[in-house]
Image (cartoon, rainbow, N blue to C red):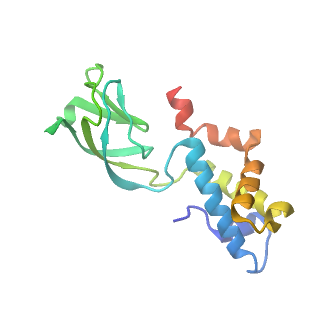
Amino acid sequence: MSVVTVAEVKALGRISGTNQDTLVQDLIDSAESYVEAFCQIKLTSEASSEDLDGGGYYLLPSRKPVTAVTSVAEDGEAVDADDYGFEEFGLFRDDEYQWTAGKQLFAVTYTGGYVDVPAALKIAIRQMALRGYINFEAKESSDESNRESKWQGLWNGNDIAAMLEQFSQKSILD
């Protein structure tokens, strides 16, 4: 599910007609995938269950931002909800100790991904899709993987990275 529409990109670029709608949708899909990978986030909200490793101050689910936690179990035993909290990138213990060390020791059921995608992320995705559309060489490439790599080359600039950096889980965890 796209968080940006073809109509939004076409309006930004003052593009009329429907001949290129498939290309614009491909660009949106590629831009959204790039944003998710770059920022280590999910643009859409979804309930998830994962077995996570312990041993640190945070349990780090793969679907971020974390927006709700339904349950946590340590080695099959429920952890009281009063004993932990969460931030957008992970779960922490309220007593400030580390989680018990162990591979896939914690079963976590949670909701991750954006319920409402921030406007700044939508703007970045629209701009990324429009850059790909405007770039003649990328549009004309018949090899889909080659075309996508050319689009992503357009997005590695400082302005796009600066827009995305504030949402990047990598920068939060560093």
Q: Nearer the viewer, residue 104 or 169?
A: 104
Left or right, 135 with respect to 45, comes to right
Instruction: Report the residue at 32% width, 33% height from top.
Output: 53
Tell me residue 121's x, y (percent).
Answer: 61, 50
Tell me residue 101's x, y (percent).
Answer: 28, 25
Pick out the residue farthest to the bottom: 18
Is the residue 84 above or below the residue 167 in the image?
above
Where on the picture, by quarter, is residue 32?
bottom right
Pick out the residue farthest to the right: 136
Left or right, 72 with respect to 26, comes to left
Left or right, 78 with respect to 46, comes to left
Instruction: Report the residue at 27% width, 43% height from top.
Output: 108
Tell me residue 2's x, y (percent).
Answer: 56, 64
Tell me residue 157's x, y (percent).
Answer: 77, 42
Instruction: Report the residue at 21% width, 29% height from top.
Output: 83
Tally the marks.
Answer: 0
Instruction: Report the residue at 52% width, 30% height from top.
Output: 172
Pick out the residue farthest to the left: 77
Q: Nearer the viewer, residue 69 or 52?
A: 52
Q: Nearer the viewer, residue 173 or 148?
A: 148
